[in-house]
Amino acid sequence: MTAPLLQALLEGFYALCGLLALDAAVRAWRTGLGGRGTGLFWGLFGLLFLCGGLLPPALVGALLLVLGGLSALGRVRPVGAIAPSPARKPPGRLLLIPALALGASAFLLALLAPGEPRGGLVGLGAGALFAALLALLVTRARPAELLQENARMLGLMGPAGILPQLLAALGALFAAAGVGGVIAQALSGLLAPGARLAGAAAYCLGMALFTAVMGNAFAAFAVITAGIGIPFVLDQGADPALAGLLGLTAGYCGTLLTPMAANFNVVPAALLETASRQRVILAQLPVALALLAAHIALMYFYAF
Amino acid sequence: MIRLLGVVLVVAGFLLGVDTIAVVLGAGLATGLLAGLGLEETLATLGRAFVEARYISLFLLSLPAIGLLERYGLRERAAEWMARLAGVTAGRVLGIYTLARGAAAALSLRLGGHVQFIRPLVYPMALGAARRRHGTLEPAEEERLKGLSAAVENYGNFFGQNLFVASAGVLLVVATLAERKIAATPLAVSRAALPVALMAGGLALAQCLLFDWRLRRGRKPR
C-alpha cells in the first residue's frame, strides 16, 4: 500500500470514529439518558474527529475548553440504555472468532505496509470493521445493535475515553514551553561530573520523572539524554547502546506510574470499571519501583 | 522555573482528585500563558496537537464489536471455559498472558490491548479461574484482580517491544545518539533490552503468583 492511500484510509477511519461519537450523542440527546450535557460532549468530540483538520486550530482549542467544562461540571454520564439480554445466544466458541479476528487481522493488515507506522493504524481500523462484521454474522444481531452497543461502551468509558488524546496535546504544549529543559537543568545542577553512580541514578530517575510528567517516554528521551545521559553517563565511559536503552526503559517505569499515560493506565481502569481511578497504577507501583532500582544497578554495574 | 507551574498543577490536580480533563486543560492554559505564547497561540497549539493525535483514539472503532460480543455473552463464556480447566488459577492465566504478550511484542506482533483482549477475554478468564477455586471474591479482591489484569498487558508490551531490532524505541535510541555523533547499532541496542525484559517478566510472574497466594491464604480449597 502506498503512503497517500494509507493516509486516505486513515482519514476515513477518523471520520467513522466521528460518526460513531455523533450517533452516541444523538442517542443521548433523544433518550435524555445522561442529560443534555452528555449529548453535547460526544457531539463536540465527534465534530472534532469529523472535521477537526478543517477548523482553525484556535477554535479547536476553544472547543476543547467546552469539553473540559462539561466534564468538570459532571455533566457527562453513561448513555447506554442497557438493552434486555438477547434470548438466543450463540455457542461460545463462535463468539471467540470475531474477538480473536480483531487482534489478528490488525496484525496481518499491518504486514501489508511494512515499516510504515500508519500501516499499523490502518490495520487497527480495518481489523475493527472486520471484527464488527464477523460479530454481526455470529450473533445474527441487527446492525442497529452495533450502534447501541457503541453508545453503551462510549458511555462506560466516559470522559476518560478522550483523555489520551488530550494528554498528547498537553505534552505538545509542555514541549513548546520548554518544560523538559528546566527539569534536566535542575537535575544536572545537583550533580558533580565523574560520579558514576550518581550519574546513572540521575539519568534513570530523570527519565522516569520526566516521562511521568509528559506521559510518554519517547518525548522525554531526547531532552533527558542530552541534558543528563550524555554528560553524566556516556561521557564517563558507559557503553552507549546499553546506557541509551536502559535510559529509555527507565522512562517506561515512569509510564507505569503516571495518570498522564492515560491510554495505558486510566482508560483500562475505566474499561474494567474499577472502583478507584488509580487502580492500575497502584497495581504497577511495586513492579515499577523495583524495576527502576534494577535499571540504576544495571546501568552502574553493566554499562560501565 | 515558573514554567513548571503547569506540571505542579497536574500533579496537585491528580492527587486531589479534581476532574482530570479540567486539570489537563487548566495546566495547558497556565503553561502556554506563562511561557508567553498568548491565549490564541496556546489554544491553537492545544487544538493542533489534539487533531494530530487523533490516531491515539482509533481504538474507539473496536468498541461496537466488543460491546456486541459482550451482549451475546463473550465474557460469561470466557469465565466458563476457565471453570472447566483443572489446575488453572487467576495468577497463572495472567502470568501466561504476560509472557505471551511479551513474546508477541518482541516479534513486533501487534497482538494485545486492553480493549481487544483484557476486558473481553483475559480479565473474565482470570476471574473465572479464581471463582472456580475460591467461590465468590470479595469486592476488594476483584478490584485488585482488575488492576493486575490491566497491568500485565503493560508489562508485556513495554518490556518486550525493544527486543525487536527495528522497534520504534530501539530506532529512537540509535537516532538520538547518532545526532550527537555517538555510534550504536540497532542490534546492540535491542540486545541491551534483554536483562530488563527478563527482570520485568520475573517480577510480573512473581506478582501474579503472589495474587494467587493471597487469595489462598485464609481460605480452604474447594
Image: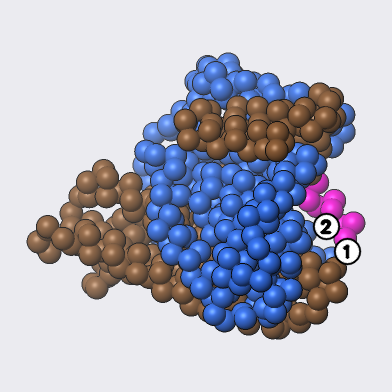
Chain colours: A blue, B brown
* Residue in view at x 61 percent, y 72 percent: A196
Q: Nearer the viewer, residue B55 or A202?
A: A202
* Residue in view at x 41 percent, y 46 percent: A279
The disc at residue B51 is none
Q: Nearer the viewer, residue A229 or A169?
A: A229
Horizontal arrangement in the rendering, residue A13 relative to residue B146 (left or right):
right
Q: Nearer the viewer, residue A267 or B204?
A: B204
Magenta region, residue range = A2-14
Label 2 element class:
helix
The disc at residue A2 is 1
Q: Chain of mark 1?
A: A
* Residue in view at x 76 percent, y 80 percent: B184
On the image, the x and y values in percent for residue B31 come to 72, 33
The amino acid type found where label 2 is placed reads: Leu
* Residue in view at x 53 percent, y 33 percent: B12
Name the residue carrying label 2.
A6
The amino acid type found where label 1 is placed reads: Thr
Callout 2 environment at 10 Å: few (<14), some (14 to 19), or many (20+)?
many
Query: Toward which corner of the image does residue A118 lie, by quadrant?
Result: bottom right
On the image, the x and y values in percent for residue B194 come to 56, 79
